[in-house]
Image (cartoon, grey):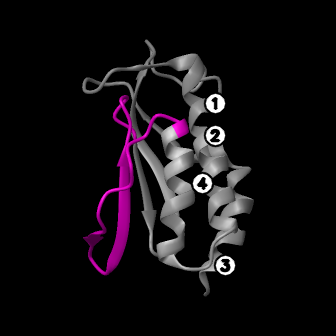
Amino acid sequence: MTHRNAARRLVALAAAAPLVLLTDCSLGAEPQPADEAVGHDEDVAAGVSEALAERDAWDEYVEPFEEVLAEQGFSELGAVERRGAMHYLLATDAHGARLELDEQGRFSIADARIDADPCTPEALGIG
């Protein structure tokens, strides 16, 4: 599968952005207000998906991501890391969220600390 095909599939997945949101209502980084969490991650997912749709090669992914991630409060993408056979880049934000972009054009957002008690889908506006 080419990067362009993976990117096109990813754009279709952006419509399911709430599935990208993986939250953690525990201790750690500064919590994000619950009423902003889903919208924030949807904005990140939409920007990342759009950037993927416009690029063909791995190296070309980094530049458009940097702008989207900076606008959404994420760090720059770090050096290429490896998990098993998969290579990926990682960016984080002040709420503990981790955005990972892998070499196949897939990305995930996880581990954001959310200020919600109780931490339920309803508190996040997705239930």
Q: Is residue 22 above or below residue 30?
A: below
The answer to whether 125 appears left or right of 78 in the picture is: right
**Residue located beneath label 2 in the image:** 42
**Residue located beneath label 3 in the image:** 4
Question: How far from the left and from the top, in percent, is residue 31?
Answer: 38, 20
Query: Alpha-carbon neighbours of circle 4 within 10 Å: few (<14), some, or many (≥20)?
Result: many
**Residue located beneath label 1 in the image:** 39
Asked if residue 13 shows in the view, the reply is yes
Looking at numbered disc 2 in the image, what kind of residue is underneath it? Glu
Looking at numbered disc 1 in the image, what kind of residue is underneath it? Gly
Q: In which quarter of the image is the N terminus?
A: bottom right
Mark with earlier residue (3, 1):
3
**Disc 2 and disc 1: Cα gap in Å?**
5 Å
Along the viewing direction, whichever of 44 and 26 lies nearer the viewer = 44
The answer to whether 124 appears left or right of 50 in the picture is: left
Helix, strand or loop at mark 2: helix
Range of the magenta residues?
71-97
**Residue located beneath label 4 in the image:** 48
Q: Verify whether residue 82 appears in magenta.
A: yes
Along the viewing direction, whichever of 2 and 85 lies nearer the viewer = 2
Question: How far from the left and from the top, in percent, is residue 100?
Answer: 41, 57
Q: Measuring 47% from the left and 74% from the top, which residue is drawn there?
A: 59
The answer to whether 57 appears left or right of 39 in the picture is: left
Report if the CB atoms under discs 2 and 1 are less than 8 Å apart: yes
Q: Measuring 63% from the left and 60% from the top, which residue is drawn there?
A: 51
Q: Quadrant of residue 32?
A: top left
Question: How far from the left and from the top, in percent, is residue 119?
Answer: 45, 21
User: Residue furthest toward the top?
Assistant: 117
